[in-house]
Amino acid sequence: MVPRRPLEDEETEREEISMRSSEIRFPEDEAVHDHIVEWWYFNGHLVDNDGCNYSFMDCLFRVDVKKVKIPFISRIPLKISYFSHSILTEHKTKKCVRRIAPFSIISDDSFSKPTLCANYINPQLKYGYTNCVIERYPVSAII
């Protein structure tokens, strides 16, 4: 028996369904979901007072401690834990500074706004802490 080739209408319908299911929907897709691991990242470019150009990336990870199968994380006495990863690159010298914070503390108002907002600190034993904010503003607020 030779498999029947789908009719053009069936193929088009399947492609349309596939495209609809992979569309990004804001603000729902940037909110917190019930996943084992989830992350939000913010990328950008900076110019300092001397005209040097930089690129940066900051990423906040959310982990369901009881479901993830990573020994270190699964021993944390919390249901949900956060950690972050940041990179800053200077374009001219290509110098890259990376930082992984194994534990991040988010503020009570994080993920409570209609659009993405995560405010968190990364405690450091030696230097105190760093404060990070990932927030999406409407384009009209930036221009």
Image (cartoon, rainbow, N blue to C red):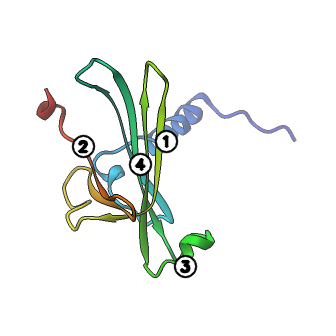
| Residue 10, x across and y down, in percent | 58, 36
Mark 2 or 3, nearer chain start = 3
Residue 59 circle label = 4
Mark 3 or 4, nearer chain start = 4
| Residue under the image location 42 percent in, 72 percent down | 80
Instruction: Rate crowding at label 2 as few (under 14), some (14 to 19) or many (20 or more) other CA atoms within 10 Å.
Output: some
Looking at the image, residue 76 lies above or below residue 108: below
Q: Amino acid at mark 1?
A: Ile
Looking at the image, residue 111 lies above or below residue 10: below
Q: Circle 2 is placed at which residue position?
A: 136
Q: 143 and 24: which one is in front?
A: 143
At numbered mark 2, what does the secondary structure look like: helix, strand or loop? loop
Mark 1 or 2, nearer chain start = 1
Q: Is residue 75 left or right of residue 77?
A: right
Q: Amino acid at mark 4?
A: Cys
Looking at the image, residue 35 lies above or below residue 88: below
Q: Circle 3 is placed at which residue position?
A: 75
| Residue 30, x across and y down, in percent | 34, 50
Instruction: Rate crowding at label 3 as few (under 14), some (14 to 19) or many (20 or more) other CA atoms within 10 Å.
Output: few
Assess whether mark 2 and mark 1 are in contact (beta carbons under 8 angstroms). no
Per the model, the C-alpha gap separating discs 1 and 2 is 29 Å
- Farthest-out residue, right: 1
